[in-house]
Amino acid sequence: MSLRFVTAAALLALCSAYRTPPVAPVCGARSSAAARPVLRPSRPSSSAAALAANVLALPAFAELPSLPAFDMPKFAEAIPDAASAVADAIPDAASAVADAIPDAAASAVATIPDAASTVADSVVAAIPDATAVAAAAADTVVAAGPGYSQASYYTVLALYVLSFPGIYSLVKRSVKSKVVKKTYELPGPAAEGGRVTREIAADVVSYFQANNYKIKDAGKAIIFEGVQAPLAGRAAFLTFCTFIAIGSLALVLTIVEQQVFGLGNGLGNIWYLSTLVSPIAGKYYLDNAERSEEVSVKLVTEDDESITDLTIMGDDEEVERFQKTLDLREKGMVYVKGLLE
C-alpha cells in the first residue's frame, strides 16, 4: 500500500466523522430574509473514531520520519550575520565591476581600427565594379541616342527665338511715356458734401506743384509741365531682366551647339560670358529716361451742378499716382476694395 493512498484514506475518515445536522423548515410567510440554518459539528461516531485509529496505526505512518522542531530564536540571531555578510560583499563586487570596465573599453577601442580597415577595404574593392557599371550605363545612353523628340526640340527652339526680341522691346519702351486719358466723377456744388469747382482746381494745382510741375497754360484746361527723372530701381530691374534673358540665350546656344557639332566641339560654357553685357540696359535707361512731361487737367460741371467731371491726360504712372493721392473714382466704374485695404 502506497503512502499517498494511506494518507487519503485517513483524511476521508476524519472528514466523515463530522456531519451537518438537517435544516429545520421555517414556518411563516415566504421571505428572502428567512432565518439561515446554523451549522454545528456533531460528535464523531464510535465507528469513525475506530477507523481513524486503525488507519493511524498502519506501519506506513510508523515509518514516516519526524520533522525537527523549528527554532525561532536561532533564526532571528542568524539574520544580522547574514545581512552583515551581504553588506561586506557589495564593495568587493562593485570594485570588481569597476576594474573590469577599463579592460572592456580598451578591448572595444582596440577593435575599432580593424573594423574601419575592413570597411575601407570593402569600399575600395567595390569601386572598380561601380565604375564598370557607370561606364556601361553611359555607353547604353550614348548608343540609345537622345531621349527626346526632335520635333518638340525644334518647336521649342523656334518659340524661344521668336520671343527673345521682347527683352529689346522692354528696354526701348522703358524711356518712353505711355499717355492715357481718364475721367473722374466728383459731387458738384449742389450735391450733398460737394465742393465748388474753384476748390477742386486748387487741390489739383497744389498736387502738381508739390511734384515739381509748373503751370504752362491755364485756358479751358490747365496744362502742367514737369521733368521726369530716371529711377535707379528701374535701371536695376532692367539690368536683371537682361541678365536672365542673355543667360537663357547662352544655355540655348550651348544645347544647339552640342546637337549640331557634338559634345566638346564649340564654345561650350564660353557663351555664358555674354551675360556681362547686361548692365548696358541699365545704362541706356539712365541716359535716356530724363524727359519733359505734360499733364492736362479739365474740370466740367453739369448744368444742375450735381456732378463735376475731372478729365486728366498724361503719363500712365503719373495719372495713377494722382488718382491714389486725391482718392478719385473713375466715371462709370464701380470701386471694389482690395484684400489689403
Image (tube, rainbow, N blue to C red):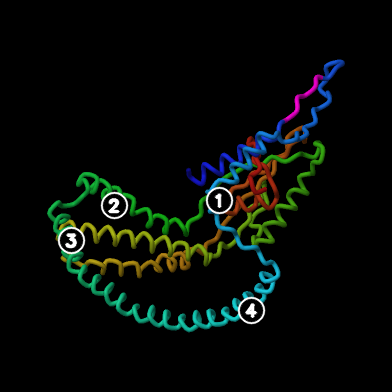
Q: Is residue 274 above or below residue 304?
A: below
Over which residues does the magenta segment extend?
Answer: 20-25
Residue to which mark 3 is pinned: 133
Q: Quick check: marks 4 and 3 in contact, CB under 8 Å?
A: no
Characterize the magenta stretch by its predominant secondary structure. loop
The crowding category of the residue bearing disc 3, from other C-alpha atoms within 10 Å (few below 14, some 14 to 19, many at least 20), is: few
Quadrant in which residue 115 is drawn? bottom left
**Marks 3/2: CA–CA distance:** 40 Å
Earlier in the chain: of badge 2 and badge 1, it is 2
Instruction: Report how far apart the C-alphas of labels 2 and 4 lie in the structure.
Output: 98 Å
In the rendered image, residue 159, in percent from the top left (x then y), is placed at: 30, 48
- The mark that comes first in sequence, 2 or 4, is 4
Of discs 3 and 1, which sits in the foreground?
Answer: 3
Q: Residue at x 77, y 39 (%)?
A: 188
Residue that numbered label 4 is attached to: 84
Mark identifier at residue 161: 2
Q: Amino acid at mark 4?
A: Ser
Q: Position of residue 74 (x, y in %)?
A: 67, 71
In contact (CB < 8 Å): disc 2 and disc 4: no
- Residue at the spot 69% in from the left edge and 66% down from the top edge: 72
How many callouts does the rendering have?
4
Q: Earlier in the sequence, mark 3 or mark 1?
A: 3
Residue in the picture at 66% in, 35% down: 48
User: Which image quadrant is residue 53 in?
Assistant: top right
Amino acid type of the residue that numbered disc 3 sits on in the rendered structure: Val
Residue hosting label 1: 316
